[in-house]
Amino acid sequence: MLAGKRILLIIGGGIAAYKSLDLIRRLRERGAAVTPVLTRAGTEFVTPLSVSALAGEKVYTDLFDLTDEAEMGHIQLSRVADLVVVAPATADLMAKMAHGHANDLASTLLMATDTPVLMAPAMNVRMWEHPATQRNLAQLLGDGLRVVGPNAGDMACGEYGPGRMSEPLEIVAAIETALGQGPLAGKRILVTSGPTHEPIDPVRYIANRSSGAQGTAIARALASLGAEVVFVTGPADVPAPQGVKVVRVETAQQMLTAVEAALPADAAVFAAAVADWRVASSSGSKIKKDAGRLPVLEFAENPDILATVSQRKTDRPRLVVGFAAETDDVIANATAKRARKGCDWIVANDVSPATGIMGGTENAVHLITVEGREDWPRMSKQQVAAQLAARIAQALV
Ligand SMILES: Cc1cc2nc3c(=O)[nH]c(=O)nc-3n(C[C@H](O)[C@H](O)[C@H](O)COP(=O)(O)O)c2cc1C
């Protein structure tokens, strides 16, 4: 059921726009309210009158409409909903979203919104398979947009292949999941990600090669199953996913404070590559280069976030998952780490430079639990994330 939920529905200029009329009906049957927006091209395919009559609400079409802007400014309009749905998402709308254009109402709302976005692409198979569309799709997925479809089948243009918009009920199911009615609905999960930066002085720091890609993918996968995700991230290379609560930190000490503030949680996944040491007394001003004299850095041990949370007497999450990035004796080291830290699972991977995993797009992990070890095949970090999120959902039922 979608009672009490509001969907901002952006209808692009494609043949499949007619299916969006049925989508509005299906959403309203389930108790959702629909605020409709039509692109200019969209008005060539379905009339504002039909859309407005089915939604039972005013339809918005123009960025520079004096009355609309006075009644409800476009920024406010972008924030009214629990979810923004783009259906059909044309090749053009996908390109605009991927490149951050904001030259009409739909694209401006998509840039201004702070709510998750789900798109249902629909286009000719050649347009869908075009490298530009596929590049845009990869960019949008990386930015955290959710996608439903397209399906393969006969198309209005007479060709066959992927490009048909998902059916209205498929889109409704994707909306329900996006709105947290998936298997992790009602579960709060903490995810840490990225490297930490430990200052030497105000301009220099010690870091590591973690990009944050795996932790980000895990947060996104958990959110897509309906979890409420608190995402505590160090300075990562990849953007934080949409639809999660993002807490940005720099140092290991700040990360521990943010993690403790985020508890209680049902599960915690510690994917961040936290620096083991920090500079004991970082300088308040830039250390000057002094000919013939080299600075000597003394280190202090950073807090062990995984062990601290795993061994908490109160508020310990039911499931604590740690990561072990190793270059030697991966399994032995990770197994020992699980016992030493007191966590439930360890996701272990070999981050030797030859594997290309650290900073790369793929991962090959071993899941180490009290029952033993599973060796997962090498796959994309998104697939690792999806598989891990599904396992977490099973463990929390
Ligand atoms: C008959 C017809 C059907 C079209 N169907 C699609 C479509 O299914 N998907 C698509 O991406 N573009 C389609 N187009 C092209 C878009 O309408 C065009 O790119 C337009 O600029 C999209 O504007 P919008 O993204 O602002 O809605 C179609 C054009 C015509 C004339």
Image: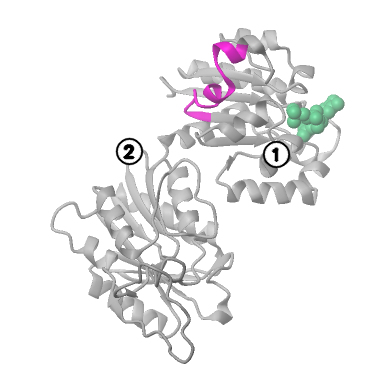
Q: Position of residue 259 (x, y in %)?
A: 29, 54
Q: Is residue 267 magenta?
A: no
Marks 2, 1: nearer the viewer? 1
**In the rendered image, the vertical position of residue 93 relative to residue 267, given as above or below:** above
Q: Is mark 1 within 8 Å of ligand 1?
A: yes
Task: Please state if 275 lies on the left or on the right of 20 as rendered.
Answer: left
Hey, which quadrant is residue 36 in on the image? top right
Q: Residue at x 59, y 51 (%)?
A: 142
Residue type marked 2? Gly
Residue lying farthest right?
158
Which residue is the site of mark 1?
Answer: 94
Residue 143 versus residue 207: which sits nearer the camera?
A: 207
Among numbered discs 2 and 1, the one appearing first in the sequence: 1
On screen, 159 above or below 134?
Answer: above
Which residue is tagged 2? 186
Who is closer to the viewer here, 307 or 381? 307
Please name whichever residue, 65 or 84, is drawn nearer the observer in this view of the structure.
65
Q: Residue at x 52, y 64 (%)?
A: 211
Q: Is residue 277 left or right of residue 356?
A: left
Question: Which element is circle 2 on?
Answer: loop
Colour scheme of the picture: one colour
Q: Residue at x 70, y 39 (%)?
A: 94
**In the image, is 204 to the left or to the right of 160?**
left
From what the image shows, is residue 161 above or below residue 35?
below
- Check disc 1: other Cα within 10 Å, few if <14, some if 14-19, many if 20+: many
Q: Which residues are magenta?
A: 68-83
The image quadrant where one finds the N terminus is top left
Regarding residue 219, the answer to whether it shows in the image is yes
Q: Where does residue 352 sit, x and y in percent of width and height?
A: 51, 81
The residue type indicated by label 1 comes to: Met
